[in-house]
Image (cartoon, rainbow, N blue to C red):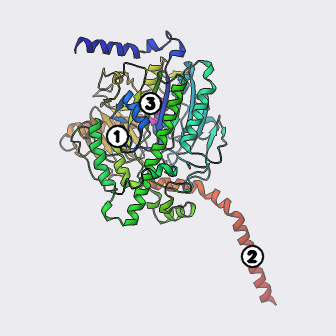
């Protein structure tokens, strides 16, 4: 290493060291922190990662910061959010499974509370104790009772959605799985505007929170949680129109284009191999009407992404106006890979129900009153060149775009790519270190808590290390029976139906991120050793086996039916009562006539 390079690294490390950001520095000089969490975005949906969707504001953050190309989360919403909030794996944080996909026989077991449990402490709790203002807007999905909402988990102010998703234009739930929305503010039911757009509302509220307490002089932690691009996929007409005709060539071509662009952008290795997923279907065999419908859904998806990016730009512009931009750490990531599920392809009853509750015409896709979904075909392009989708333990479900930027920090080389393995549990530890706030070590506020397991990513930010994870230390993961053991460059993985066949496979995800070459046969010793590592992980963390025949999509449907049956029957009781009276009257009249 040259002397110049060594000096640069020493300067960088000094700039980022906790000591210089801790008690020795005035609190006003501590960095602000903004987490920008997208919902269901695939690895190459961001322009800086190879996507064609217009995301200029996210791309600008990438140009100022570091793109992490080997960053992993959970396969669905709330388990990732639990780990992002706490730095503790989902099974110890209470989200061994999320409310919508948990089988009833698991609910309430240790680690399967289906909400953030009291054995963990959030990053907001720790930052607030360290002198930060703490705010959350958007999707929470970690509890819906008064004692599990953000304002009792470390947030000073919060506008929070307790469910997995909701309508983007009005206060209406996804009617296929919920009876009502659960938006709250300050721990109480929120009164939303009659008409709004979700991404705009989330940023409006965050700006108001930041400004309201600005006079305190304290730094702020802003957790911004979009519901873009969760089902229902919706956007304004002008944004949808901007993508008219863009996707009429289909998902196979788009998947190839994204792969090539990802290589060019430096977030995928040259020559990366890729597979054609059997769930995506053959674009050329679709009818003209089917192609129009699928292309229109993808146009709405892209429009929703662009609208979210515009709102991120609005927040950034505001931070520049108030002089907070340069000293703000920005983190952008998605909670899991792209969503392949489409209610219109989930069976006759679900399709019929969707058509009764929503306007599912081609012309209405993505507009108010519709329940649009990207679908498996274009989701395969969103995760290109990876295999798998949301819910799976394949890279397409777990590897997501992640960007860290600190515009005023000269130690971070703008536009660089960190290719080493990193995990969502690392984020709280990293941000606490950068904020100069001591991380909890198994105790917080005088009580024992689950210790944080994540690592500090600072050396990857400065280029001082390619990875902070040891090549010989395993990291386990499980969700809905889909399981993983990471160890160095290698990944042991198993997916249950409908995403896989339940068999373990072994991949080198550094050389083969597309998971095309199973090494279980050619490297049997490693394969066996990693299986033992997984068994140890599952035992220590009390991972439960899935019930016979379990699949996540079927469980969502079953849980929704249990949740909706009584409310829907209650809604229908007046009609039923009138019908009963009419039938009783008819019977009485007939008997009276016969008696005569």
The disc placed on residue 335 is none
The residue pinned by badge 2 equals: 584
User: In the image, 55: left or right of 225?
Assistant: left
- Residues under numbered marks 3 and 1 in contact, where contact means CB atoms less than 8 Å apart: no
Disc 1 packing (10 Å; few <14; some 14–19; many ≥20): many
What residue range appears in magenta?
84-95
Q: Which quadrant holds the C terminus?
A: bottom right
Residue 420 is covered by the magenta coloring: no
- Report whether residue 41 is seen: yes
Which numbered tag is attached to residue 331? 3
Pointer 1 residue: 484
- Left or right of residue 93, residue 147 in this image: right
Nearest to the eye among marks 3 and 1: give it. 3
| Residue 422 placement: quadrant | top left
Above or below, 118 against 551 in this view is above
Q: Residues within 10 Å of mark 2 (few under 14, many from 20)?
A: few
Residue 155 in which image quadrant = top right
> Alpha-carbon neighbours of circle 3 within 10 Å: few (<14), some, or many (≥20)?
many
Examine the rendered structure and indicate whether residue 446 appears above or below residue 422: above
Mark 2 or mark 3: name the one nearer the start of the chain.
3
> Which residue is situated farthest in the right direction here?
596
Of mark 1 and mark 2, the one earlier in the sequence is: 1
User: Residue, x 36% and y 52% (percent of image)?
Assistant: 499
Disc 2 is placed on an element classified as helix
**Residue at (32% x, 31% y) in the render:** 421
**Could you tell me residue 299's position as x and y percent?**
43, 52
Element type at mark 1: strand
84 relative to 579 in the view: left or right? left
Q: CA distance from mark 2 to mark 3?
A: 65 Å
Determine the image quadrant of residue 463.
top left
Q: Position of residue 439 (x, y in %)?
A: 48, 20
């Amino acid at each position: 290493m040259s002397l110049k390079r060594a000096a640069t690294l020493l300067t960088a490390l000094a700039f980022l060291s906790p000591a210089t950001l801790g008690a020795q520095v005035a609190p006003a000089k501590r960095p602000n922190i903004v987490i920008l969490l997208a919902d269901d975005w695939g690895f190459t949906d961001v322009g800086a990662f190879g996507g064609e969707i217009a995301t200029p504001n996210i791309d600008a953050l990438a140009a100022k910061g570091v793109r992490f190309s080997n960053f992993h989360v959970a396969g669905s919403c709330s388990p990732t959010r639990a780990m992002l909030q706490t730095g503790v794996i989902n099974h110890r944080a209470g989200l061994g499974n999320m409310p919508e996909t948990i089988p009833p026989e698991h609910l309430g077991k240790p680690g399967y509370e289906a909400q953030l449990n009291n054995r963990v402490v959030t990053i907001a709790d720790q930052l607030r104790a360290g002198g930060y203002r703490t705010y959350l807007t958007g999707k929470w999905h970690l509890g819906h009772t008064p004692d599990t909402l953000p304002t009792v988990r470390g947030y000073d102010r919060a506008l929070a959605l307790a469910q997995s998703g909701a309508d983007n234009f009005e206060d209406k739930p996804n009617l296929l799985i919920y009876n009502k929305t659960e938006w709250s503010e300050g721990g109480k039911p929120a009164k939303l505007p009659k008409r709004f757009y979700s991404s705009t509302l989330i940023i409006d509220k965050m700006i108001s929170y930041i400004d309201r307490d600005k006079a305190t002089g304290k730094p702020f932690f802003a957790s911004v949680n979009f519901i873009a691009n969760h089902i229902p996929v919706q956007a304004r007409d002008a944004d949808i129109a901007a993508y008219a005709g863009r996707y009429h060539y289909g998902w196979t071509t788009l998947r190839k284009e994204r792969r090539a662009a990802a290589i060019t952008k430096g977030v995928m290795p040259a020559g990366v191999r890729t597979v054609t997923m059997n769930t995506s279907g053959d674009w050329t065999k679709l009818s003209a009407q089917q192609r129009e419908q699928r292309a229109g859904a993808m146009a709405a998806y892209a429009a929703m992404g662009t609208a979210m990016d515009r709102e991120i730009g609005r927040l950034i512009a505001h931070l520049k106006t108030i002089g907070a931009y340069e000293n703000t750490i920005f983190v952008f990531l998605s909670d899991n890979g792209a969503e392949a599920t489409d209610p219109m392809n989930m069976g006759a009853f679900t399709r019929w129900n969707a058509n009764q509750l929503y306007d599912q015409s081609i012309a209405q896709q993505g507009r108010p009153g519709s329940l649009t979904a990207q679908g498996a075909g274009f989701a395969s392009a969103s995760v290109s060149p990876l295999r798998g989708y949301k819910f799976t333990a394949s890279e397409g479900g777990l590897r997501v775009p992640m960007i860290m930027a600190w515009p005023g920090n000269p130690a971070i080389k703008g536009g660089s790519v960190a290719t080493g393995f990193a995990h969502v549990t690392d984020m709280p530890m990293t941000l606490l270190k950068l904020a100069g706030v001591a991380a909890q070590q198994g105790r917080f506020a005088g009580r024992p808590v689950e210790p944080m397991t994540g690592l500090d990513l600072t050396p990857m930010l400065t280029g001082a290390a390619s990875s902070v994870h040891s090549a010989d230390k395993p990291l386990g993961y499980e969700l809905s029976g889909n399981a993983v053991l990471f160890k160095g460059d290698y990944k042991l993985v198993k997916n249950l139906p409908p995403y896989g066949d339940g068999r373990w496979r072994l991949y080198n995800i550094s050389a083969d991120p597309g998971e095309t070459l199973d090494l279980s046969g050619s490297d049997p010793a490693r394969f066996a050793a990693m299986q033992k590592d997984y068994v140890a992980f599952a035992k220590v963390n009390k991972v439960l086996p899935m019930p016979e025949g379990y699949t996540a999509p079927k469980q969502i449907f079953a849980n929704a039916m249990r949740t909706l049956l009584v409310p829907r029957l209650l809604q229908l009781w007046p009609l039923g009562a009138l019908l009963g009276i009419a039938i009783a009257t008819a019977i009485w009249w007939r008997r009276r006539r016969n008696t005569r």
